[in-house]
Image: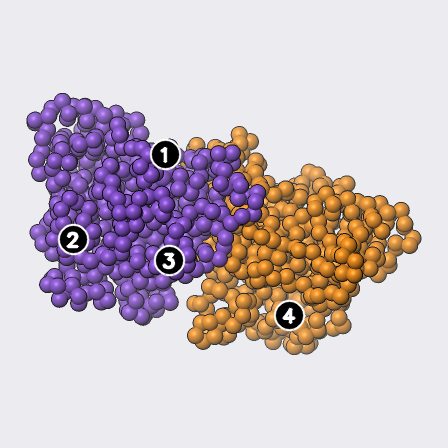
Chain colours: A purple, B orange
């Protein structure tokens, strides 16, 4: 049973609208979500210094957006797609929703096996809008709530909310009224129209990652990023006619592997001296950035720029653990951050984030306060002026609207938590079964298999090179206690030892 | 603001489900809605006698369904598509929702002009799920409510809920999670795959009636009825995997004009001696009937037959007012009923209706009690065990579940009402601006332009040939009073006289 929106006298703007037959004045909202984009995969410096990545890549439209809005330098997500996307749509922390690794096939764990650890029976079927489906986290989506309040809701791109043949695979089950290509898969078979985005000439998908619904672009040289952008703009053209505010979730498949060559930009980066792999990666980034620019231009041309909020975000850190796809030494691709996708280190979880909100957010500003992906849920509801609502799940997220308006600081006295009792796949620094706490300047990572604890002072050591647990035992003790207490409170899962069948200790039990 | 479902202890089956993680045991529901199908367009006799139409047409699957369920011989709708479909989706009587003629273009009345009458500013933009859109009736769709309760909801075929570029044009705005071809249009450009269902070779629609979304059948010889059935069965294949009960609204474009030849059946009817027009019409009917049979067979093959309710219905009477498309003398095509689509006479509003509900409805039964299209709204909610819900609009419909179970008779002491202060288009008996009341055996039609009142005893005179107002003045007086009172109560609209600018009298004012 889905819990629902309640009418509220507090909801004045909308109530007035309902009575007065005026067009709904609430802002449009675009959530522009990039896949696997690292903190440095842009010409816009989110660090205090400009890195060689900022020099190599060209993202003029992210710069354009930052000029109109606020950059967030400590915006966090989970280190893998599904945990992030399920937190986004549910407002719940990953330790609570238990979709802690990536999802695809129904009833199939995607974890690598371990000789030492028995992994928990996590929610490998993803989130789900109804009860009764095994290994799912039942969720009232924020999109459902804003739809019910009068928003026209559009999904474009990658969904990755629930496994194949479960209700959550379909974005229309999450409140999206228009769905362009969204399904269960968290990746794509091909960006290339020449390859029918992963379909044979007869139209058969070549893998579960084949992008559905782009048939009209098959056989063309149109890159998937561009096809999605064109489809999104068509959906916006239609939305504009409806006398409703719209919510567009522009969830690019870019810049996830395979790093196909977007030939609109590839040669330029070759000429700049990048090798084939890095030139392809840079082109993939710029194609995504062009999409952002095209949407911004659509808003300007259609007179909607002044009444549209744009939120730019990525779902996890940049891919750095397999050098088939990237240049440079392993685990360095998110420099100055350590490691990348799948890691508890900053390289896995710190995201490039920008918010523009005309008339509310001061243009060209920067915010160094931290926030976490589940905060998007109450934030977007607040932006949509939906003030009273019921959900089947607890909401762990906290609105970051006060950071946008400058009228408060929700990060004060707040800890952030991550839980990944899973084995993602690739290996590397900070990658493996862990739970993690961030508490102001401190960050503690607890490794389930070994019991090891790592303590870092993030502002002083953004690269997590100086492990300080021996120097600060009392901080380790306090953070362990708070981390263990939170995990127990939300009913988080942890592995067990195969040898004994006993659960591994919580961080405050060792 | 959409009003919403409330949790209720009364909703025991579902509550138990939510807690117990059992698959949802509620029945699947298929509403099989045919367009412009007359009461006699079938081999299944709904009258006490078999007509020559029953002999000519072949609908073995309607017979099969009737053998499993209950036939309704006095099931009513409005005489035009939009009023019916808006009553269906809103549960409101047409006199209340004011979508009293057919809708298509935003802000455009579709009425023919009159020298005498100024027609009211009716809701020519249809129903709408949000407030603030002019000339719409704001509606909480029953589909939205059953979706919120856990049903997977599928729309296939003709929607016709709201005008182009208004929110109601999109069935996903009415709670449908899957939409196959549904849009604003109430008709179709072509049934023929060879004609791309009304698209040029370049894929451009040739009219607002071109069927969207069937691209994969373009250039084939697959008739639209068959293409929709194949798509519906694919959607059911998917629905079956989701651990949710499903609601399929199978809303055929058939048997609306153009009466293209369905070559799977055409020659057979020629051989039976029907002329080209009638053979094409018969083939159109049998193609629709095959679709019903295919869906029934799908249910049997997939083990869902015992847990699926099927409701068969048409949206208005058979087309009888333009002999380009049909054979025989004008206005006789619904014999023994008088007139057809667009008329207040029985030929315009009496529909072939069948309901099968395994374990609840006694197979092979017949019900002669009357009911009206808005009754489907509370009935389907009751079938779906959604017992407590809020809607933005008043619900005029009354559940006919007691007729199905044999445990009650909601038609007792109940009047039915129609209002059509419009000029549809074609002319003929009973066609024109009227309002109408059915009160047990009596039916009174009031003609706005002339003030004429016609009284018929329906059980004794199903063909409405013996007008009895002169013989029964007290019945005329009582029915006029009840009709006028109802129209005023629900805020119904009426025309005005152009000459004076004054509204025409209500039936009890003359």
Kindly check if marks 2 and 3 are in contact, taking CB atoms under 8 A apart as contact: no
The subunit carrying tag 3 is: A
**Residue at numbered disc 3:** A300
The image position of residue A100, as x and y in percent, is 27, 40
Discs 1 and 2 lie in a common subunit: yes
Foreground mark, 4 or 3, reads: 3
Discs 2 and 3 lie in a common subunit: yes
Q: CA distance from mark 4 to mark 2?
A: 68 Å
Q: CA distance from mark 1 to mark 2?
A: 36 Å
The subunit carrying tag 4 is: B
**Residue at numbered disc 4:** B281
Foreground mark, 1 or 2, reads: 2
The image position of residue B394, as x and y in percent, is 63, 42
Is B375 above or below relative to B111? above
The subunit carrying tag 1 is: A
Q: Residue visible at 43% across and 32% down? A: B19
Rendered image quadrant of residue B422: bottom right
Image mark for residue A30:
none
**Residue at numbered disc 1:** A395
Q: Earlier in the sequence, mark 3 or mark 1?
A: 3
Instruction: Report helix, strand or loop for mark 4.
Output: helix
Q: Residue visible at 15% across and 44% down? A: A48
Quarter that holds the C terminus of chain A? top left
Q: CA distance from mark 4 to mark 1?
A: 57 Å
Q: Crowdedness of circle 4 by 10 Å Cα count: few (<14), some, many (20+)?
A: many
Q: Crowdedness of circle 3 by 10 Å Cα count: few (<14), some, many (20+)?
A: few
In this image, B416 relative to B104: left or right? right
Foreground mark, 4 or 1, reads: 1
Is B190 above or below relative to B461? below
Discs 4 and 1 lie in a common subunit: no
**Residue at numbered disc 2:** A54
């Amino acid at each position: 049973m889905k819990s629902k929106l309640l009418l509220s006298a507090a909801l004045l703007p909308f109530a007035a609208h309902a009575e007065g037959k005026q067009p709904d004045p609430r802002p449009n909202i675009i959530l522009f979500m990039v896949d696997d984009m690292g903190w440095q995969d842009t010409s816009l410096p989110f660090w205090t210094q400009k890195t060689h990545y900022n020099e190599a890549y060209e993202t003029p439209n992210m710069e354009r957006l930052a000029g109109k809005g606020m950059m967030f330098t400590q915006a966090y997500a989970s280190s893998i797609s599904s945990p992030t996307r399920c937190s986004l749509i549910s407002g719940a922390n990953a330790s609570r929703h238990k979709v802690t690794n990536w999802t695809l096939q129904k009833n199939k764990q995607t974890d690598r096996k371990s000789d030492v650890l028995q992994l928990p029976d996590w929610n490998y079927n993803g989130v789900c809008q109804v009860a009764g489906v095994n290994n799912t986290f039942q969720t009232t989506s924020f999109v459902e709530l804003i739809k019910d309040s009068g928003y026209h809701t559009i999904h474009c791109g990658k969904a990755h909310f629930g496994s194949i043949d479960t209700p959550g695979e379909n974005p229309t089950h999450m409140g999206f009224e228009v769905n362009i290509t969204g399904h269960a898969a968290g990746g794509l078979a091909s960006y290339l129209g020449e390859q029918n985005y992963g379909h044979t000439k007869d139209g058969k998908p070549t893998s579960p990652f084949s992008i559905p619904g782009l048939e009209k672009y098959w056989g063309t040289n149109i890159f998937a990023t561009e096809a999605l952008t064109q489809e999104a703009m068509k959906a916006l053209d239609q939305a504009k006619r409806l006398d409703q505010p719209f919510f567009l979730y522009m969830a690019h498949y870019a810049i996830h592997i395979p790093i196909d060559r977007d030939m609109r930009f590839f040669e330029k980066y070759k000429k700049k001296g990048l090798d084939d792999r890095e030139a392809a990666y840079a082109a993939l980034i710029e194609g995504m950035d062009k999409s952002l620019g095209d949407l911004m231009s659509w808003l300007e041309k259609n007179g909607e720029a002044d009444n549209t909020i744009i939120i730019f975000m990525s779902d996890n850190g940049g891919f750095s653990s397999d050098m088939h796809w990237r240049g440079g030494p392993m685990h360095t691709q998110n420099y100055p951050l350590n490691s990348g996708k799948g890691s508890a280190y900053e390289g896995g979880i710190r995201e490039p984030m920008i918010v523009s909100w005309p008339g509310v957010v001061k243009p060209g500003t920067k915010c160094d306060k931290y926030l976490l992906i589940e905060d998007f849920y109450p934030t977007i509801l607040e932006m949509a002026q939906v003030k009273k609502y019921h959900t089947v799940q607890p909401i762990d997220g906290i609105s970051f609207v006060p950071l946008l308006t400058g009228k408060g600081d929700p990060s004060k006295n707040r800890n952030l938590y991550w839980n990944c009792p899973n084995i993602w796949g690739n290996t590397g620094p900070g990658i493996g079964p862990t739970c993690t706490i961030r508490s102001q300047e401190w960050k503690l990572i607890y490794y389930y298999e070994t019991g090891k604890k790592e303590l870092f002072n993030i502002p002083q050591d953004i690269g997590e090179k100086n492990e300080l647990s021996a120097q600060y035992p009392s901080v380790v003790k306090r953070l362990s206690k708070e981390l263990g207490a939170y995990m127990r409170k939300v009913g988080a899962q942890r592995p067990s030892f195969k040898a004994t069948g006993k659960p591994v200790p919580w961080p405050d039990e060792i």
